[in-house]
Image: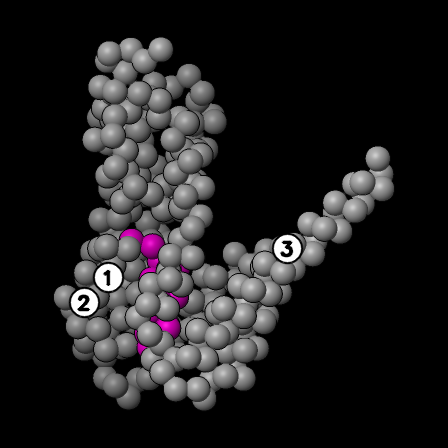
């Protein structure tokens, strides 16, 4: 039964400082990535306000690069938004996994926690929670917020700095190639399992074959085709596994 004071847990200062300290090594990756995004956004034609609004609202490097690449290629804004959402679907799994360690933390803290949830904050927090199963919820929540506030602040600041730098880079330097290269570097490690590989290959082939279609429709078809191929492959694998299990019985 829920105690009257169960939702009054607040993140502790001790946990906050511990999280901020633990996030320092991660900043070595966050800072240059933010610089790259800000620079590429400027190269793609975003002004400073658009770049900062984008990076502040999304706060997710992989999905931001994915959406940026699509917009640079002339794809519809809706497709860019949907693609970014698909890339970020793992956040739903992250939030479900981390919530079980925050029993008693009120909604006043859970809601803003969603803004600070990203790969590094999740990985570092879960590792600590497993290493310290008896730690107070206040310290656990503080640790997460310490990581999140530090990394997100650096990410936004470096995105701004990258945008300022990008605005001063001569057009002749031709940094347009950097966006797809960075996107590939971020997304490639995520392609695991047969279904994901099939989806990536089908969408890549269709994107090349249909590149000449107007209004970015080729990208829409390629995305839909990749998703359909991946789902079909997953169903086929599941059916084969079911047959094998039934035969074993």
User: Residue at the spot x=25%, y=59% of the render?
Assistant: 55
Rendered location of residue 216, percent (x, y): 39, 80
Q: Which residue is mark 2?
A: 50
The stretch of residues the image draws in magenta is: 59-73
Q: Which numbered disc, 3 or 1, marks the residue that appears first in the sequence? A: 1
Q: Nearer the viewer, mark 3 or mark 2?
A: 3
> Within the magenta stretch, is there residue 123?
no
Residue 230 position within the rendered picture, expressed as x and y whole percent measured from the top left: 59, 61
| Distance (Cα) linking label 3 and label 2 | 38 Å
Q: Name the chief secondary structure element in magenta.
A: helix
At x 22%, y 49%, the residue is 153
Q: Which residue is tagged 3?
A: 234
Residues under labels 1 and 2: Cα distance?
Answer: 6 Å
Image coords of residue 7 (percent x, y): 25, 20
Q: Is residue 66 magenta?
A: yes
Q: Which numbered tag is attached to residue 23?
A: none
Determine crowd level at label 1: few under 14, some 14-19, many 20+ residues with C-alpha closer than 10 A: some
Q: Which residue is mark 1?
A: 54
């Amino acid at each position: 039964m829920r105690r009257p004071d169960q939702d009054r847990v607040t993140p502790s200062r001790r946990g906050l400082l511990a999280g901020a300290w633990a996030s320092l090594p991660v900043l070595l990756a966050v800072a240059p990535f933010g610089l790259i995004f800000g620079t590429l956004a400027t190269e793609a034609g975003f002004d400073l306000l658009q770049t900062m609004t984008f990076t502040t609202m999304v706060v997710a490097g992989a999905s931001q690069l994915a959406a940026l690449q699509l917009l640079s290629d002339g794809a519809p804004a809706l497709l860019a938004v949907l693609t970014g959402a698909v890339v970020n679907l793992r956040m739903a799994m992250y939030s479900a996994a981390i919530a079980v360690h925050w029993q008693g933390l009120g909604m006043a803290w859970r809601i803003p926690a969603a803004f600070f949830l990203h790969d590094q904050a999740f990985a570092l927090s879960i590792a600590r929670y497993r290493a310290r199963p008896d730690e107070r919820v206040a310290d656990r929540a503080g640790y997460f917020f310490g990581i999140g506030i530090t990394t997100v602040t650096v990410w936004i600041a470096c995105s701004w700095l990258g945008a300022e730098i990008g605005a001063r880079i001569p057009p002749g330097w031709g940094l347009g190639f950097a966006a797809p290269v960075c996107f590939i570097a971020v997304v490639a490690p995520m392609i695991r399992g047969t279904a994901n590989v099939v989806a990536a290959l089908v969408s890549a082939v269709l994107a090349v074959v249909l590149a000449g279609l107007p209004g970015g429709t080729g990208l829409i078809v390629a995305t839909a085709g990749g998703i359909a191929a991946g789902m079909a492959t997953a169903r086929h694998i599941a059916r084969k596994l079911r047959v094998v299990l039934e035969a074993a019985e």
